[in-house]
Image (cartoon, rainbow, N blue to C red):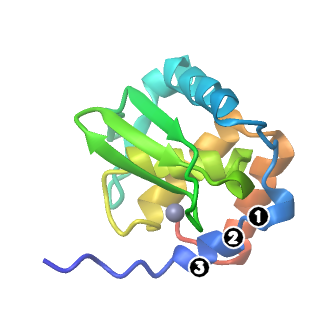
Amino acid sequence: MKAPRDSQRQKIYDSEPSHKRGKRFRNIHEIQEFVDFIIASVWYSKYKIPVMGWRYNSFGMDVCVDNIEVRDGRGRRRATGFRTEYKKGVIKLPRQFRNMLIILHEIAHVIQTQLPYHGPQFARIYLDLAQAFAEKKVAGNLENAFKRNRVKYD
Ligand SMILES: [Zn+2]
C-alpha cells in the first residue's frame, strides 16, 4: 500500500526557523537526560495520543514508548526519529539540530501512530510536547507559525 503523501512537511519545517528553536543543548548526554525526564514525567504517563478523525480529548491512546535512545547523528544532513522495536525508539541529532524544538519534533515522530509523517496527528503531538516542555515563547511561536502556515493539527 502506498503511504499517504507527506504534504505538510515543508509547512512544518517553515514553522521552525533556526533562530526560534529554543534552548541549545551542549551534548548528547544532556539531551538524553532531557528525553528521559520527559518520559518519566507525569505529563507523559497521562498523555493520550490524539487519534485524528476522532475527538481526541474523549478518545486517545496511551503512549506506548518507554525508552528513547539519543544518538549523535554524525554525518547526517537532517535530524531523524523513529520507532525501533516494541516500546522503543531512537532519535539522531547532528550538531546543528541539538535544540529544544527539533528534539521535541523527533520525539513526536517516535510516538506518532498515524501517517503521513508530518500529518495532523504528528503536528498535534509536536505542539502538545512544545506546550508542555519548551520555553513558553518558543511554544507560542510554534503555534502561531502553524496557524500562519496553515498546518493542520486538529
Ligand atoms: Zn520530521
Q: How far apart are marks 1 and 2 (CA)?
A: 5 Å
Return the x and y of residue 153 as percentages of the image width and height: 52, 62
Return the x and y of residue 16 as percentages of the image width and height: 72, 64
Residue at the (31%, 51%) spot, across then down? 113
Mark number, residue 144: 1
Q: In this view, which residue lies farthest toward the front?
A: 75
Mark 3 element type: helix
Mark number, residue 153: none
Return the x and y of residue 6 as percentages of the image width and height: 41, 77
- 21 to 14, vertically: above or below: above
- 137 to 25, vertically: above or below: below
Residue toward you, 121 or 103: 103
Q: Of the residues tagged 2 and 3, which is closer to the observer?
A: 3
Can see residue 56? Answer: no
Pick whichever of labels 2 and 3 is earlier in the sequence. Answer: 3
Pick whichever of labels 3 and 1 is earlier in the sequence. Answer: 3
Q: Where is mark 2, residue-wise?
A: 147
Within-10-Å neighbours for mark 2: few <14, some 14–19, many 20+: few
Residue at the (60%, 50%) spot, across then down? 93
Within-10-Å neighbours for mark 3: few <14, some 14–19, many 20+: few
Q: Where is mark 3, residue-wise?
A: 10
Are the residues flagged by discs 1 and 2 in contact, CB closer than 8 Å?
Answer: yes
- 58 to 16, vertically: above or below: above
Q: Distance between the residues labelled 3 and 1?
A: 16 Å
Residue at the (44%, 22%) spot, across then down? 45
Looking at the figure, which quarter contains the N terminus? bottom left
Residue at the (59%, 41%) spot, across then down? 129
- 132 to 124, vertically: above or below: above
Q: In this view, does 36 lie to the left or right of 2?
A: right
